[in-house]
Image: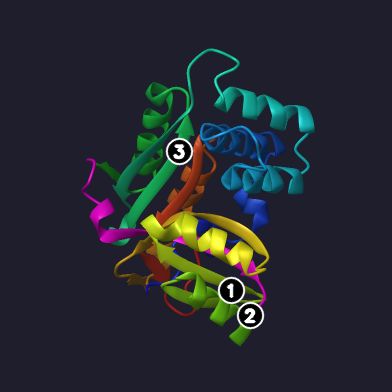
């Protein structure tokens, strides 16, 4: 299975990832609101609990968290937040998927399109890029080694990779919730669980100038308040940095 495709796992560090605290809270608030649409009780809604935990880790105030839950549950009126997926190509032919959570697509789409056009890319029509990716469940658990591997196999995982002191477990999209719940039953300590996009094939960027252009495009997308995640099909050759 292809390696992890999130730009947040490739990029140059936390300082670039979220330069402003307000932007961090906006992203967390959108993620919480989207998760809360499936239920506002974090004890019953695992995705919501994880979104809340990530927000708390960045010191998001409890009042902001509750307001985001209420927003997702439709208690505050106004436009409902929705998830949208944009597709595009970057320099060097890099395929890029952009997930966003927004209450106004008439604001979000032009912002995403402008980020692509300003940095040597172009936004594509629906389906033109997404077919190059597979949507999978991704579950991160603490620990590595044979015990975690056996738990993952018993739970029905498709693949397991080790990253530092964590194991990254991939599942079929339709089996995601079942595998996640089984891992919990088996005592695995889950730190993150979500659907993700993995590229079927990757391209290697071996030109420093192209890598710089891609880095600037990806950072521009990541800095948009409505963008929650970006996925790519490229990797950098040894010695090449964005």
Q: Which residue is mark 1?
A: 167
In the depicted structure, whether residue 174 falls above or below residue 42: below
- Asked which quadrant contains residue 124, the reply is top left
Q: Residue at 38% across / 22% down in the picture? A: 106
- In front here: 236 or 132? 132
Q: Is residue 137 magenta?
A: yes
Give the mark nearest the N terminus, 1 or 2. Answer: 2
Q: CA distance from mark 3 to mark 2?
A: 32 Å
Q: Which residue is mark 2?
A: 144
The residue that disc 3 covers is: 100
Which secondary structure lies at badge 1?
strand
72 horizontally vs 109: left or right: right
Residue at 29% x, 70% y is 201
| Horizontal and vertical percent position of residue 120 | 33, 49
Please give the range of residues in magenta: 125-145
Left-right relation of 175 to 194: left
* Residue 45 among magenta residues: no
Name the foreground residue: 195 vs 84.
195
Residue 175 placed where, x, y %?
Answer: 41, 59
- Residue at the image point whose x is 32% and y is 70% from the top: 203
Q: Residues within 10 Å of mark 1 (few under 14, many from 20)?
A: many
Q: The N terminus lies in which quarter of the figure?
A: bottom left
Q: Does the residue at mark 1 contact the one at mark 2 (Cβ under 8 Å)?
A: yes
Q: Secondary structure at mark 3?
A: strand
Instruction: Inspect this view and state whether residue 213 appears.
Output: no
């Amino acid at each position: 299975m292809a390696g992890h495709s999130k730009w947040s796992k490739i990029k140059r560090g936390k300082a670039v990832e979220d330069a402003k605290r307000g932007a961090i809270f906006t992203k967390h608030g959108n993620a919480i609101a989207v998760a809360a649409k499936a239920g506002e009780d974090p004890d019953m809604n695992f995705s919501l609990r994880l979104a809340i935990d990530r927000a708390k880790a960045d010191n998001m105030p409890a009042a902001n968290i509750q307001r985001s839950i209420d927003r997702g549950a439709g208690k505050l009126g106004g436009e409902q937040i929705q998830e949208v997926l944009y597709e595009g190509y970057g320099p060097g032919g890099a395929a890029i998927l952009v997930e966003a959570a927004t209450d106004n697509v008439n604001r979000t789409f032009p912002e995403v399109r402008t980020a692509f056009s300003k940095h040597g890319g172009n936004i594509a029509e629906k389906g033109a890029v997404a077919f190059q990716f597979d949507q999978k469940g991704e579950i991160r658990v603490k620990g590595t080694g044979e015990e975690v591997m056996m738990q993952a196999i018993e739970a029905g995982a498709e693949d397991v990779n080790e990253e530092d002191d964590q194991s990254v477990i991939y599942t079929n999209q339709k089996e995601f919730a079942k595998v996640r719940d089984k891992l919990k039953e088996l005592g695995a300590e889950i730190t993150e669980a979500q659907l993700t996009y993995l590229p079927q094939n990757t391209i290697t960027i071996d030109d420093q100038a192209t890598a710089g252009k891609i880095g600037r495009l990806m950072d521009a997308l990541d800095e948009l308040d409505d963008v929650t995640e970006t996925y790519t099909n490229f990797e950098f050759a040894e010695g090449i940095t964005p």
